[in-house]
Structure formats: C-alpha cells, structure tokens
C-alpha cells in the first residue's frame, strides 16, 4: 500500500501561557494534524502551570520533549541555589512546583531530551536545545543527576546554518526542530534547523509550525501564528501572585 501524506505541528516554549496554547491548538486542530510535537518548556514564566500540563498530557496526540523548566520540576531544584538562579528565580520555580501534582514528576521524567522520526522516507529530529557535554553523557543514565539534568548549551542569539551544525548533532536527520531561544528562526546547513518561535512568550500571537510530508516525501513547512487575548493572562499574574512577575512581564510580554 502506498504511503499516505502526513501533517504534523511543532510547538515550543508554551511556558504556562494557557490562552496562547488554546488558541494554537484550535488552529492546529482545524488544520487537521496527525500529531503535535512540543519541544520543551511547557511550564515556567507563565501563570498557568497546572492547566497547561493538564492540557498537554490530556491529549493523546502530543509528544513532549524535555526542556530546562520541565527538568527543574521533574528532577527537583538544585540545592544550594546555583549561581545562575537569582532568589526571585528560585521563588518563581518553587511557586510553579507547588501548583503541580507531585505525581506528575514521574510522568515528566519520561519525556526524552530528543525525539527522532522517519516519516514517508524523510528524517526529523526534535529537541529543546543542544545539551552541554556532561548532559549528553548523562542521558544514558536511568536516573540523571538532578544537578545536571537541566543543563543546556549557551544560546547563540543570531545563528547561521553553520553555527547550528556545530551546535547540534543532527545524526543524519534532514530537519531538526528546536526551541529554548524564543525568536523564530529557519536556517540551513547540512540539515535544516527550524525554531517555530516561542508559543507562549509573545505579546499577542501564538506561534507554531505546520509540516506536511507528502506521500512521495516532499516537505512543506508553514510558520504560523494565531492571535490570542492576553488580557486574562496578564490578570492571572496578579490574581495568582506569581513570584517575579514584575521582572517577567516586561521581559517576556512587553509590558511597561
């Protein structure tokens, strides 16, 4: 039997922004996708961690990849507080974890740091970002050390295709999707590297990618965005007394 065409969506960095996620899922469902891949950071920053995880885990068609914020919940916060985390950041993370059912830690721990797929003869890879060498070595461990579980390489702000070739190990994948850095990016080296842009950290639009793989293997990528009402999101930061909201809102949502 001949292969059938496939369509899937890629989302990344929802960051507990439930209104943006719901807007994107409505548009993705209308497009008729076979599945969705989320490339990490379901939680962190936004005010809806429990509802966001519930939405992602409650659907049978979403395949999640581990992000740094997800790993902090899954494996626990480092103790003592590491140099990269301010007191406000630690308070924010502790608030997030207090909103979540502790039983979900084991579920999130099962999320891989990388997924690979072969679809209609074409090869795809999905990750949050490149890992630092100790983390790559630790991925084979059954229980990674929580001190290194969330380590990712430093972000390259404006990467070229060659930069991304050096940063990622594509391992033969023709197309690699990633996130972590919130701006949208589409670069080509030996592989094509696509960041759909953070779904949850944009002022008024949720970003995502639609990928169609024809039966004969032709690939079409459409970088999409859909508007959402950010009023309830901004109100929830105050209503839920989210720690570090005075720092988060201007950085990630452009508020004064």
Image: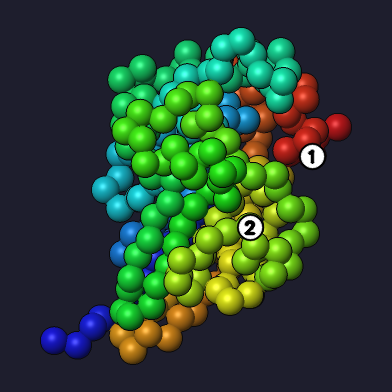
The answer to whether 212 is drawn above or below residue 22 in the figure is below
Secondary structure beneath label 2: helix
Quadrant location of residue 103?
top left
Q: Is residue 33 left or right of residue 46?
A: left
Q: Are marks 2 and 1 in contact (CB under 8 Å)?
A: no
Q: Nearer the viewer, residue 256 or 88?
A: 88
For mark 1, does the 10 Å Cα neighbourhood hold few (<14), some (14 to 19), or many (20 or more) residues?
few
Question: Where's residue 238, x and y in %?
Answer: 66, 18
Residue 242 vs residue 113, the one in the foreground: 113
Q: Is 24 placed above or below 174 here?
A: above
Residue at which label 2 appears:
167
* Residue 44 in the figure: left or right of residue 62: right
Quarter of the image containing the C terminus? top right
Relative image position of residue 213 (x, y in whole percent)? 39, 78
Q: Which mark is residue 254?
A: 1
Quadrant assignment for the N terminus: bottom left
Does 85 sit above or below residue 63? above
């Amino acid at each position: 039997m001949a292969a059938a065409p496939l369509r899937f969506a890629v989302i990344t960095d929802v960051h507990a922004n439930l209104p943006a996620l719901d807007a994107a899922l409505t548009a993705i469902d209308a497009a008729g996708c076979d599945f969705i891949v989320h490339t990490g950071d379901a939680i962190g920053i936004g005010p809806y961690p429990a509802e966001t995880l519930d939405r992602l885990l409650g659907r049978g068609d979403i395949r999640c990849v581990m992000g740094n914020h997800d790993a902090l919940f899954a494996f626990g916060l480092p103790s003592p507080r590491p140099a990269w985390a301010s007191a406000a950041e630690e308070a924010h993370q502790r608030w997030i974890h207090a909103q979540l059912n502790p039983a979900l830690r084991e579920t999130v721990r099962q999320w891989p740091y990388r997924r690979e797929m072969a679809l209609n003869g074409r090869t795809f890879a999905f990750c949050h970002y490149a890992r630092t060498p100790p983390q790559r070595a630790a991925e084979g461990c059954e229980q990674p050390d929580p001190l290194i579980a969330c380590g990712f390489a430093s972000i390259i702000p404006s990467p070229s295709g060659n930069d991304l070739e050096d940063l990622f190990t594509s391992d033969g994948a023709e197309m690699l999707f990633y996130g972590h850095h919130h701006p949208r990016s589409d670069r080509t080296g030996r592989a094509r590297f696509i960041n759909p842009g953070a779904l949850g950290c944009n002022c008024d639009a949720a970003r995502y990618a639609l990928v169609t793989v024809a039966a004969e293997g032709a690939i079409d990528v459409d970088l999409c965005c859909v508007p959402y009402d950010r009023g309830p999101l901004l109100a929830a930061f105050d209503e839920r007394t989210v720690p570090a909201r005075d720092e988060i809102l201007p950085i990630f949502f452009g508020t004064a």
